[in-house]
Image (spheres, coloured by chain):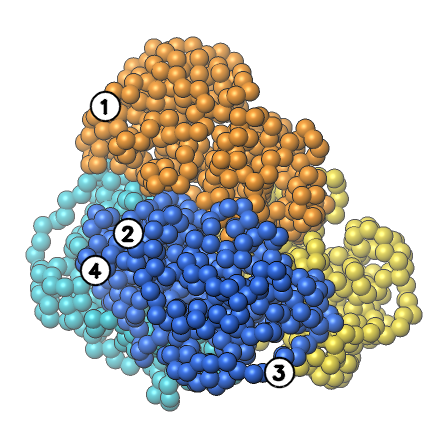
Chain colours: A yellow, B orange, C cyan, D blue
Amino acid sequence: MLKIGEIGWIEKDKPEINPRDALVRPLALAPCTSDIHTVWEGAIGDRHNLILGHEALGVVDEVGSEVKDFKPGDRVIVPAITPDWDNEAAQRGFPSQTTGPLGGWKFSNFKDGVFGEYFHVNLADANLAHLPEGMSLEAAVMIPDMLSTGFMGAENANIPMGGTVAVLGIGPVGLAGIAGAKLQGAGRIFAVGTRPKATEVAKKYGATDIISYKEGATDEQILEATDGEGVDAVIIAGGGSDIILDAVRAAKAGSIVSNINYFGNGETLPICREGWGFGMADKDFATGLCPGGRVRMERLADIVTYGRMDPALMATHVFHGFDKIEEALLLMKEKPKDLIKPVVIIDENL
Amino acid sequence: MLKIGEIGWIEKDKPEINPRDALVRPLALAPCTSDIHTVWEGAIGDRHNLILGHEALGVVDEVGSEVKDFKPGDRVIVPAITPDWDNEAAQRGFPSQTTGPLGGWKFSNFKDGVFGEYFHVNLADANLAHLPEGMSLEAAVMIPDMLSTGFMGAENANIPMGGTVAVLGIGPVGLAGIAGAKLQGAGRIFAVGTRPKATEVAKKYGATDIISYKEGATDEQILEATDGEGVDAVIIAGGGSDIILDAVRAAKAGSIVSNINYFGNGETLPICREGWGFGMADKDFATGLCPGGRVRMERLADIVTYGRMDPALMATHVFHGFDKIEEALLLMKEKPKDLIKPVVIIDENL
Amino acid sequence: MLKIGEIGWIEKDKPEINPRDALVRPLALAPCTSDIHTVWEGAIGDRHNLILGHEALGVVDEVGSEVKDFKPGDRVIVPAITPDWDNEAAQRGFPSQTTGPLGGWKFSNFKDGVFGEYFHVNLADANLAHLPEGMSLEAAVMIPDMLSTGFMGAENANIPMGGTVAVLGIGPVGLAGIAGAKLQGAGRIFAVGTRPKATEVAKKYGATDIISYKEGATDEQILEATDGEGVDAVIIAGGGSDIILDAVRAAKAGSIVSNINYFGNGETLPICREGWGFGMADKDFATGLCPGGRVRMERLADIVTYGRMDPALMATHVFHGFDKIEEALLLMKEKPKDLIKPVVIIDENL
Amino acid sequence: MLKIGEIGWIEKDKPEINPRDALVRPLALAPCTSDIHTVWEGAIGDRHNLILGHEALGVVDEVGSEVKDFKPGDRVIVPAITPDWDNEAAQRGFPSQTTGPLGGWKFSNFKDGVFGEYFHVNLADANLAHLPEGMSLEAAVMIPDMLSTGFMGAENANIPMGGTVAVLGIGPVGLAGIAGAKLQGAGRIFAVGTRPKATEVAKKYGATDIISYKEGATDEQILEATDGEGVDAVIIAGGGSDIILDAVRAAKAGSIVSNINYFGNGETLPICREGWGFGMADKDFATGLCPGGRVRMERLADIVTYGRMDPALMATHVFHGFDKIEEALLLMKEKPKDLIKPVVIIDENL
């Protein structure tokens, strides 16, 4: 990113590392919708000459003197969010918010991202995880953000065993939300979206009913399908600010609306007063930023290792070579119908 | 209530009771701001010839054939919310939402309220509680709604031991929220309000800092007092819809905004997008309707019995006699400066 | 059950029902290990002429005057536990403990069980669930106890997404615990047992590692397989009292030992002092009795309807006809190697 | 501690510090029952020439090069438990168990304690807290262990607002448990103990009923006082292993037994099988090790600053001067009747 609305290649020095940090080369990368927001919508404010990207697998190039568990040559999963684990917010139980709101998000936000020849990882022992041998890169590269964010949507939704869930939006994060809802015990799962490839994967991940917003109001369709009862939990995984209205109306009195959407526009976001029971209908909102850190990455890797779900289904477009990053990023911007997520394999033999 | 905007006395037949119900005569009553909303703002829609009131102590007049634990002459605490305990929403963990959103709220909503010579209580064994001997009526009459709602605000806020809390609004529910926050382990408690009598009680209930919204934006004052950090929990206990903006901004990344306010106006309510971290700052919203039922009333009675807080401090205006209800209600509407809550003692010797 | 150690057929009058109750005829039945404990170990004390059984599907024969949602002829799932939903323990959040410890368990405990031509169900609207059309009886009859108890084991274990779990015991409740652990987001799942048919189903339900206690101490094998770390959660689903020692030792510091075992012998049960960190290692114990009631049954039916797991895999021995109950019960007592659970289909055409 | 059973003064070199650590001189100290266990019972195994003590206020003498928030001369609260915040157990939510079971406990366990002229603190920025100006040293020195452990007992007990609690043991940790129970919303609080000074403070901290185990079985007295119902939560804060039997029997079906006792003897600890409902009565056990770290210390300091409870009431014996440590320790061993906790003020003017 050169400036808002413009991308290109930048020449930069190799980052320096502190004793607990690591320098990593990319092994596989994926652009994220947030990168699109960052560049073309200026979502996080103006940034100049910032290297984009926060979804990566890598190979350790160099480690600081205090790093114990990683050495040059190790293949690693790099979480999108790399918290400062000794910060007060981590002690409070909110590692993604260390050093301030969303402060655990460093790549392509406060510092250069992972779309470079080398990138810097803070607190290597606490944030990196070993890439399990034999795991496909297309699958593994979904772990740092897509699985971690999507699953968080389901975890925060407090789904009762066998409960009914609606997932609004079936981009990659929404799809991971569906898989997560299944892995949190959901019975019936409504998936709201229209893109054919995505609906196909949604069903494989556990969606039982596909709702198209083109065929009527989402909330009304869900209410009708549930005899007016609504659902036990709603996961918002896309949409503009009005999606909150649908979510609140589709939710039962006594439920959670769990947000994993990035709201990019408007001064305020609207809650429907009546659907919310004037503030008294026990329809809570849960929010959060993608959980990061080593333990999270290791656990999600186990989800893949033990076949609980197959994230590679989302890797619809696979590129090979570092110079394909731009193409992959632009594909993400164009969003062709059969796209879920583009992935760039830098070099399988690294 | 005769119709929206008009009150008066109505002649009605004594209510009939089912085998598990009870007929109760009032012993002490309190009008609630909701009654004001109901009549003069038409908040719950049009109602005709509806008896108002949902805060009462009473004397059992008659019980149904299946009632075991209560008999005529028993002095009882009557919860504002009387859930249908065998309904599905109770099984889901949301008794106040039984039979539909806010469906546990029956008095002066779906059926006649407690401001009558007799009133009907559903599921007497599950909803009534014995009034402990010797408990002052001024204190006990706060239990059915003020304590139950205010305390819920603190319970839902998930306050860490020693955490910092802000309570926005110091009407009686807000004051109970302050007392509740103290009883949930809060350290520092900001109370936002200006009325002198209420601020005096706020301090007695545990407020450590009084913030006047007349002296600047509430959120800015709280942020300044906390070195920009904000608070671990916010309890919204009053205000128009914009109070949500203050709440979200004053809350830390990693906190709960717990609502006990009744939002009476507007199609939608606003969340500030940036203060909410674009939906990712771990600032959750908790809502709910006053918990009802016998166990809740018994436990709150223990709070009073064992001196954990003294609700009688809120009974600033005490009337005697059934015919004083109208005067008390109008006082609630006028809201003189020294008013917290008016109470009507019907007859101490009942 | 005629008395401890002796079973046979008893002639009894048709049970009488109260206005909110139902009389039900069995459609499919399953004997439970508890029945064996009850008769041959006298586990719940002496009982005379008690009809056994608490796992049933049925057909409604008659309903009380206040029952609204069920009518004669309806096919229903009957929960093993039928709480008194307006009792204080339900208000406290513990419906299975209504009217006293384990008081929600009525069939073949406080009153005649379901192995009769007719049986009585309290609070029909709150406790029965409609049997979904087309659901196999072999699958559905596992819902009332096996799924509800086994899943509870996983729900109480607070399994982190991708966390590692050990399930001690692979009888039908343990198998449901494994399936439940998968549906609660477990990554790696150790199943401890030796019976070949059960280990086969354990793998289908999500077990990734089978541990045989014949090949060494269970806890040591689990610790070795996890590099000495132990597991995030242990579900105890069988064994004598010493199984607790294994569980505590195999659990990480910071974990939950979730019990769904019925402990039938001994004055006391042992916790290993050192493995428990002298009471300070954050290894909590969770216990509970099978959740009952209509909402639970409906939700678990959705688990089956939407293919989240297939409980019919546990029905290894299927009998047809009311007179086969005794044979099925004795099979349960003998426990042949290929048995998981016997099921008796009374009459598919009812 | 020279060896098991023998104490004395040891000459040692000043500890060395790493970049993130601090060297601290003691300002006020308190011996703990654990110190007694360590020396005279060999509770944590054999230790030679180990400096005892883990409860301290101090003055920073020297800080490592990466420490930002503390400088020489700062007066600080030193938590008894100083977790490694970037360790995996902290990421799992169990900082007191970092690097292994009870691994957050370093002072006088894995390294020299605080009863020296200088002591070493790991991760100064994450573990130390500034001592608020004007706070009495007798009060503040209770924060590092007594308040943190005692309050944890109440926090883990999940006390419902107005719920009934029993605290077994009224040593200083039990007394803090009582104060904590009140600050977690308890209504009625039973305190079990006999020492007159301690019972006096127990009442001031919120105990409503004093139970003497000399006047009958504890569990029976509690059951009798609650009409056979038992309590919503039990906090075990003292006693031998049989105290667990009392706790389980006094607890309601549907409750938590929260342990803050150090169990020092026996291979196993007993749970009463029948009282535990054969493992099915929803009587859970919660355990834990004193929470440490900076945020915890700051929050507990706020509890003291804002007058939520006064820990100085427990400082029954106050010594002045470094050379009085031995006397204070021996007093702790002797346990005279009027002792709650001895405190040694090293030098108020430091």
Residue at image location 31% in from the left, 61% down from the top: D337
- State the CA–CA distance, disc 2 to disc 4: 12 Å
Helix, strand or loop under label 3: loop
Decide if residue C332 is on the left or right side of residue D167: left
- Mark 1 and mark 4 residues within 8 Å of each other at the beta carbon: no
Q: Chain of mark 2?
A: D
- Mark 2 and mark 1 residues within 8 Å of each other at the beta carbon: no
Amino acid type, residue under disc 3 in the picture: Asp
Task: Give the numbered dot on residue D210.
Answer: 2
Decide if residue C61 is on the left or right side of residue C68: left
- State the CA–CA distance, disc 3 to disc 4: 49 Å
Residue at image location 58% in from the left, 74% down from the top: D117
Label 3: how many Cα within 10 Å (few below 14, some 14–19, many 20+): few
Amino acid type, residue under disc 2 in the picture: Ile
Helix, strand or loop under label 1: strand
Helix, strand or loop under label 4: helix
Rendered image quadrant of residue A88: bottom right
Amino acid type, residue under disc 1 in the picture: Asp
Asked if one can make out residue A345 in the rendered structure from this viewpoint, the answer is no
Q: Chain of mark 3?
A: D
Q: Which residue is mark 3?
A: D13
- Mark 3 and mark 1 residues within 8 Å of each other at the beta carbon: no
Q: Which residue is mark 4?
A: D214
- State the CA–CA distance, disc 3 to disc 1: 81 Å
Task: Give the numbered dot on residue B61.
Answer: 1
Rendered image quadrant of residue A291: bottom right
Question: Does residue A14 lie above or below D247 as drawn?
Answer: below
